[in-house]
Image (cartoon, rainbow, N blue to C red):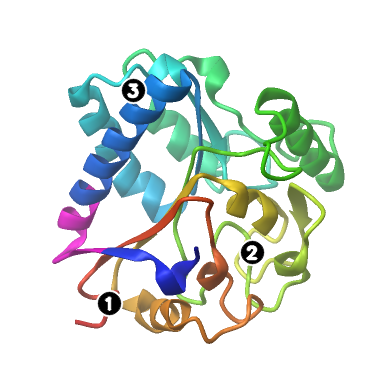
């Protein structure tokens, strides 16, 4: 299942989208914790981490989610020194402090450029952690996340998989080093399509008129992975797009 067959949850504005996403995410996590005991979620940074993630945490707290059972992974991260504002980690760490019972050791942050690791080594280190902590799924040779929550850019990128970049075509790695990103900072690490596609569910967050053309192309199913990375996001069970009227061109 990919974006061309995704279920679309429409909100009139960003507030409505954030609320719908929060309610569905909280309900899903409650069910998964009950079934699987331990849940693995990968998150985007950017506007998702700024706006949607705090609302998800508030609603999940209200629902009584046991956050100690939830592991949080990064869909991508900028390879810059820890503590700098360019890192997604700052947004996500701040948000997760409000999650009742969340364990700091369950927040899996990629290495920064001040870690002593090279960019390639940081990507390999994160892949090793995914394999060691989640393990290999029965469906494929990659770890299986329970839920991936992705944003998207006006150019159709998601995570740090950008249109026209070689990283969009990688099929044999969990995590890739990204160099010369068209959006600064230039160096990043990113989960790959095989890992994203191995997830049970993948939900895409798209708000604002700047996303309209890219979202339309992604939903059409007519673009290649190189042309529209977000259009080729898939999952084992369900792909859902949470979008406001502006992003949908309404």
Q: Is residue 54 visible?
A: no
Q: Residue at x 67, y 36 (%)?
A: 110
Quarter holding residue 49: top left
Residue 99: assigned label:
3
Magenta span: 9-18
Disc 1: which residue: 248
| Cα–Cα span, label 2 and label 1 | 22 Å
Q: Residue at x 15, y 55 (%)?
A: 16
- In the image, 138 versus 231, the foreground residue is 138
Quarter holding residue 213: bottom left
Q: Where is residue 24 in the image (x, y as percent from the top left)?
A: 26, 43
- In the image, 67 versus 13, the foreground residue is 67
Q: Where is residue 185 in the image (x, y as percent from the top left)?
A: 64, 58
Q: Which residue is drawn at 70% across and 37% down?
A: 112
Determine the secondary structure under disc 2: loop
Label 1, residues with CA under 10 Å away: few <14, some 14-19, many ≥20: many
Q: Which of marks 1 and 3 is nearer the N terminus?
A: 3
- Is the residue under label 3 in contact with that under label 1 (CB below 8 Å)? no
Relative to 142, 11 lies left or right: left
| Cα–Cα span, label 2 and label 3 | 29 Å
- In the image, 98 versus 135, the foreground residue is 135
Determine the secondary structure under disc 1: loop
Relative to 101, 38 lies left or right: right
Q: Where is residue 210 in the image (x, y as percent from the top left)?
A: 36, 77
Depicted 77 relative to depicted 168: above or below: above
Front tag of 1 and 3: 1
Disc 2: which residue: 161
Depicted 14 relative to depicted 69: above or below: below
Q: Is residue 138 magenta?
A: no
Q: Which image quarter is the C terminus in?
A: bottom left
């Amino acid at each position: 299942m990919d974006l061309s067959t995704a279920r679309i949850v429409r909100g009139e504005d960003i507030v409505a989208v954030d609320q719908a996403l929060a309610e569905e995410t909280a309900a899903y996590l409650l069910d998964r914790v009950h079934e699987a005991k331990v849940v693995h979620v990968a998150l985007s940074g950017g506007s998702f981490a700024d706006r949607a993630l705090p609302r998800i945490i508030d609603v999940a707290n209200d629902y009584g989610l046991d956050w100690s059972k939830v592991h949080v992974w990064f869909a991508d991260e900028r390879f810059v020194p820890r503590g700098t504002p360019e890192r997604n980690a700052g947004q996500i760490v701040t948000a997760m402090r409000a999650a009742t019972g969340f364990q700091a050791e369950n927040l899996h942050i990629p290495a920064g450029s001040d870690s002593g690791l090279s960019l390639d080594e940081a990507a390999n280190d994160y892949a090793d952690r995914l394999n060691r902590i989640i393990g290999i799924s029965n469906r494929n040779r990659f770890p299986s996340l329970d839920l991936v929550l992705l944003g998207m850019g006006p150019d159709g990128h998601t995570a740090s998989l950008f249109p026209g970049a070689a990283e969009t075509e990688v099929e044999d790695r969990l995590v890739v080093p990204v160099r010369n990103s068209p959006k600064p900072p230039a160096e990043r690490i990113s989960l790959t399509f095989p890992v994203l596609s191995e997830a049970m569910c993948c939900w895409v967050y798209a708000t604002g008129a700047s996303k309209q053309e890219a979202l339309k192309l992604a939903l059409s199913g007519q673009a290649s992975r190189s042309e529209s990375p977000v259009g080729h996001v898939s999952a084992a069970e369900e792909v859902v797009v949470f979008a406001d009227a502006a992003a949908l061109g309404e």
